[in-house]
Amino acid sequence: MSALQPLARLIAALLREDDRRCLLGEDVQSGGMLGLSRAALEHADLSPRLLGSPLTGVAHVAHAGGLALAGLRPIVLLSSATALLEALAAVRELGRWRWRSGQSESRGLPVLFVAPNGPGFGLGGEAAESVEATLAAVPGLELWCAGRTEELCAFLRSAATFEDDAGPRVLLLPRSVIVRDLNVDVDLDAALARAPIAVLREGEHATVFAWGEALTPALVAAQACAAASDEVSATVVDVGQLAPFDDAMEAVLVEHASKTGKIVIAHAGPRRGGLGAELAAMFADRCILRLDAPILRVCGERSTLVAGHEEPSASPSATAIAAAINQVVGY
């Protein structure tokens, strides 16, 4: 079963649960590029809340912001996260709405943007770029990134659940993750919740922080290291929320880093200017005296914009992550 099928069913369920929710996208009235609105189209009572949007990213953002100001809770299905870069000025305005409105304004802008991100469709070029570092820098914008196929629905459920005063939110769906087959049943009626940070594997000798398409290779690498040696076991931490990092989240990350004192950070996209650099800087600020080795970052080998390089080179491999784990443990 495709991982997109339960996502489509969950979107229909989210619309039924809250009549303030509506679905936006350039092709949602025909099922959506990924088929995420097909389940909702099967219900006549939900069809009026599937709103076709113009093709430009700015129009998507502006339309969704206006609906949120009117009291609705729009979910915007984008064909690519790069659409948010095209509309970056409009996204910044949504993020700054509370500040611009003054301290007495309690109403937020509960808009959720759902977008494929990074390599995985074989499209190449900017359609395969990982854009989370740019989006994480937008003040007032909350950024989530799913990592494993079996948790896609948990991420969507959590991301679509807003407090009344919440601001805009982006959920990135790594392309290499959503194209995989789902081998487990997903109970959409169960109470799905996703913590911003989750420990997926416990280990004693190193801590790997990963997100998005790098998460599965990180788990494979940790398993391989443990199988090869009893003295190389790694904790794998899924950093599901990439922005903002409040004091509580930083404290949790520092706690996991301090337990082993040896850190590997894995993520797709370029090493320079990526979110791994920001995370490494935070660890240097908060727990440098508790670290026993240099912080290693394992990222994509090449940008997808470089001619002659295949998409997989834009994501870290399990082999590269395993080598980094062994390096910090043996330092």
Image (spheres, grey):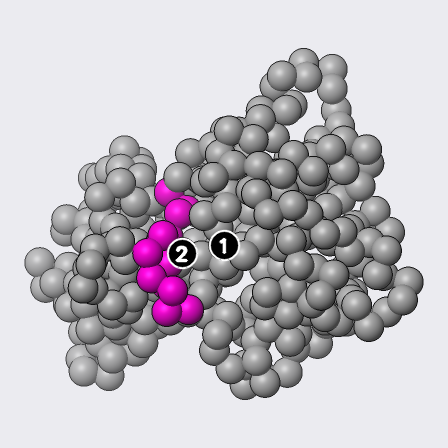
Q: Are marks 2 and 1 in contact (CB under 8 Å)?
A: yes
The quadrant in which the N terminus is found is bottom right
306 to the left or right of 80: left
Q: Is 301 drawn above or below residue 182 in the view shown?
A: above
**Kind of residue at badge 2:** Ala
Q: Secondary structure at mark 2?
A: helix
Q: Is 54 drawn above or below residue 105 in the view shown?
A: below
User: What segment is highlighted magenta in the picture?
Assistant: 119-133
Query: How far across and how far down the image is residue 59, in percent?
Result: 62, 38
Tell me the number on the disc at residue 80.
Answer: 1
Q: Residues within 10 Å of mark 2 (few under 14, many from 20)?
A: many
Res 154 → quadrant: bottom right
Tell me the number on the disc at residue 64.
Answer: none
Q: Magenta stretch: residue 132 in it?
A: yes
Query: How far across and how far down the image is residue 33, in percent?
Result: 59, 65
Res 239 → quadrant: bottom left
Query: How far across and how far down the image is residue 298, in percent?
Result: 22, 58
**Kind of residue at badge 1:** Ser
85 to the left or right of 195: left
Q: Magenta stretch: residue 193 in it?
A: no
Residue at 18 percent across and 82 percent down: it is: 228
Considering the whole magenta stretch, tell me its main secondary structure: loop
- The residue nearer to you, when weighing 144 against 124, is 124
Q: Which residue is mark 2?
A: 127
Query: How far across and how far down the image is residue 51, in percent?
Result: 76, 51
281 to the left or right of 145: left
Res 12 → quadrant: bottom right
Outermost residue toward the right? 45
First in sequence: mark 2 or mark 1? 1
Per the model, the C-alpha gap separating discs 2 and 1 is 7 Å
The quadrant in which the C terminus is found is bottom left
